[in-house]
Image: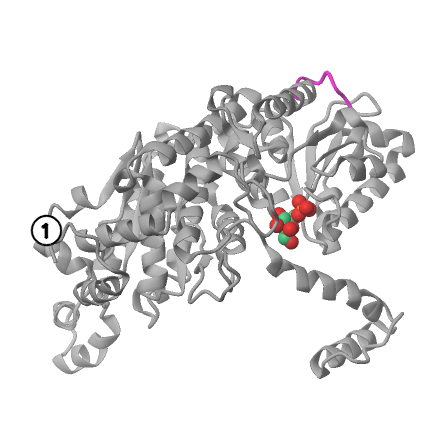
């Protein structure tokens, strides 16, 4: 078979076995210029995947596989607003939230850019009036603090993004309450003054029990301090369920809508981004949207071979489905991206953690477990396992070449970059027994001591990683990074054959929790429950005395 001919899927497994045997170390030894071939750029965003075991044949086979699974047609269907979320009969059009009118986005045939722009304008007017102090609290004091009450996609996006863009904050402080654990809202409100606080209730459905419970508690806190009359001036809402918001009693001009073609985990670009807009201002928020759009255009038009989300998706799929790595670690060497791994956990695992494919038949494999923490912190915690554990974990490093901090602090960024590069180098290079032994002898150990200790100091190496390098984490770059990962998840979903846009797997736990509330409160018995649940209920009741 000539190398340029499409390779059948079975071949991919054979090629993979050989590549894993070789590993990136040998591939670099054979081809020192590998970085040029196995890295890709879009503008000032660089994806280096040369430190994986991928080779040209595998990449070609993966591209063929993507084409055979209609990646381009499915992508075009998404951008065209076709109802590709088949189990919910919905279009998937979060890209329209960051589009320009000329993009002509339509959901199920109906133009959407006018409605998107209207909401953006309403958000802008509201946010800017709060930021300038024109819109004040019930006692005429300026709003200094925003509490966003939401969970999942109504929390993780704005919480992650406001932290990421801290250097651009020039508006009120933002706080995020998500957990139904009363500790979360109690600890948050304890620091705040009701007279200067605005509460945003963010929920796509406006039925989520955690959010509704926290919203009711926040309302009581406000009413307790200022009286019922103050609610109007201190609450706003973001939702697709405008009727339910009205029932809650939030004035219409403080309600910002979005649409059922925006999935919760893709909703940061919608009015769910209101806390971010309040923190950084509407102009910066538009820069953030433009960053997302930039990646959309790239994803839509760049050849698959040079398409960053496609390449990231192909490698992710390959690591999971062919190399059988069960997890991947997201390690931003950028402290302000501390919540990015948590954000990606929802984006990726709620999208691609499915047991059946689009046809309802079981899939052989679904998306990986996604986890992570910022570097360098992770180095002093779980990196031991990454380097020497028996499981191989592909690592995705994200790092900015530049920092926002003043030149006098340059050493911090130098150390951060050196550490990031050192980790990917160490993962690939490793250290063999002879080298470990020699190091010990050089350090003055006896031959017997060196022999005994050397095995503990061996690093197998050949552990895969990829690096995403960008100049500076500014609003547009944050938008690019998020959109890059969104489309990566989409690409992987096509390869897995999964619908990335529903989340039925969250339902059962919610249903059972509702049924267990009366059991916990003592209004119902635990009869009929499994022995463990009944035993735990009994123990809880004894502790609580009910
Ligand atoms: O339970 C999962 C989920 O439905 C997520 O998909 C969603 O982002 C989150 O709950 C919050 O939902 P809502 O915005 O409707 O409150």
Q: Does residue 51 appear in this view?
A: no
Q: Is residue 228 visible?
A: yes
Q: Which residues are magenta?
A: 131-136
Q: Which residue is mark 1?
A: 31
The question of residue 224 being in magenta is answered with no
Residue 164 lies, in percent from the top left, at 49, 37
Which residue is nearer to you in this view: 487 or 280?
A: 487
On whether ligand 1 comes within 8 Å of the CB at mark 1, the answer is no
> Front-most of 375 and 283?
283
Q: Position of residue 247 (x, y in %)?
A: 85, 38
In the depicted structure, whether residue 304 falls above or below residue 357: above
Residue depicted at 27% across the width and 36% down the height: 41
Give how far across and how far down residue 290 sits, in percent. Answer: 46, 26
Placement of the C terminus among the 4 image quadrants: bottom right
Query: Is most of the magenta stretch helix, strand or loop?
Result: loop
Q: Is residue 379 left or right of residue 62?
A: right
Residue 243 vertical position relative to residue 28 in the rendered view, above or below: above
Q: In screen coordinates, is 48 left or right of 143? A: left
Image quarter (top left, top right, bottom left or bottom right) of the N terminus: bottom left
**Residue 432 appears at what percent x and percent y?**
16, 69
Q: Residue at x 83, y 39 (%)?
A: 248
Question: Image height check: is 75 above or below 539?
Answer: above
């Amino acid at each position: 078979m000539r190398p340029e001919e499409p390779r059948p899927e079975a071949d991919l497994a054979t090629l993979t076995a050989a590549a894993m045997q070789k590993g990136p170390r040998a591939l670099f030894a054979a081809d020192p210029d590998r970085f040029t071939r196995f890295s890709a750029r879009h503008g000032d965003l660089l994806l280096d995947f040369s430190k994986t075991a991928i080779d040209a044949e595998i990449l070609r086979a993966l591209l063929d596989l993507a084409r055979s699974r209609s990646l381009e047609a499915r992508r075009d269907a998404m951008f065209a607003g076709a109802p590709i979320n088949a189990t919910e009969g919905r279009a998937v059009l979060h890209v329209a939230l960051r589009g320009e009118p000329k993009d002509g986005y339509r959901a199920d045939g109906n133009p959407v850019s006018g409605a998107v722009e209207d909401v953006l304008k309403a958000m802008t007017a509201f946010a800017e009036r709060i930021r300038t102090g024109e819109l004040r609290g019930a006692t005429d004091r300026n709003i200094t603090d925003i509490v966003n009450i939401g969970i999942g996609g109504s929390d993780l996006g704005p919480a992650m993004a406001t932290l990421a863009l801290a250097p651009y904050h020039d508006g009120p402080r933002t706080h995020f309450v998500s957990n139904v654990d009363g500790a979360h809202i109690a600890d948050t409100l304890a620091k705040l003054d009701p007279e200067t606080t605005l509460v945003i209730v963010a929920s796509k459905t406006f039925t989520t029990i955690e959010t509704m419970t926290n919203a009711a508690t926040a309302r009581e806190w406000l009413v307790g301090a200022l009286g019922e009359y103050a609610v109007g001036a201190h609450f706003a809402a973001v939702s697709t369920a405008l009727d339910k918001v009205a029932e809650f009693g939030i004035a219409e001009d403080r309600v910002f809508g979005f649409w059922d073609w925006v999935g919760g985990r893709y909703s940061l670009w919608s009015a769910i981004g209101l806390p971010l807009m309040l923190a950084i201002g509407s102009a910066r928020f538009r820069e953030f949207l433009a960053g997302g759009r930039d990646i959309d255009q790239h994803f839509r038009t760049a050849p698959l071979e040079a398409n960053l989300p496609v390449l990231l998706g192909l490698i992710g799929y390959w690591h999971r489905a062919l190399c059988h790595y069960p997890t991947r670690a997201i390690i931003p060497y950028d402290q302000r991206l501390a919540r990015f791994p948590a954000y990606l956990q929802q984006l990726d695992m709620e999208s691609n953690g499915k047991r059946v494919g689009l046809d309802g038949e079981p899939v052989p494999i679904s998306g990986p477990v996604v986890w992570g923490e910022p570097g360098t912190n992770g180095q002093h915690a779980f990196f031991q396992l990454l380097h020497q554990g028996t499981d191989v974990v592909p690592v995705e490093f994200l790092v900015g070449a530049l920092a926002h901090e003043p030149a006098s602090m340059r050493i911090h960024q130098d150390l951060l970059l050196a550490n990031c590069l050192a980790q990917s180098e160490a993962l690939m290079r490793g250290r063999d027994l002879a080298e470990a032994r020699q190091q010990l002898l050089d350090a003055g150990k006896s031959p017997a001591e060196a022999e005994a200790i050397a095995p503990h100091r061996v690093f197998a190496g050949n552990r895969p990683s990829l690096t995403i390098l960008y100049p500076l984490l500014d609003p547009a770059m944050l938008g690019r990074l998020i959109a890059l990962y969104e489309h990566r998840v989409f690409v992987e979903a096509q390869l897995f054959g999964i619908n990335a846009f529903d989340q039925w797997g969250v339902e059962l736990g919610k249903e059972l929790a509702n049924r267990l509330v009366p059991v916990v409160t003592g209004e119902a018995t635990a009869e009929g429950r499994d022995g463990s649940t009944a035993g735990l209920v009994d123990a809880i009741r004894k502790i609580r005395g009910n």
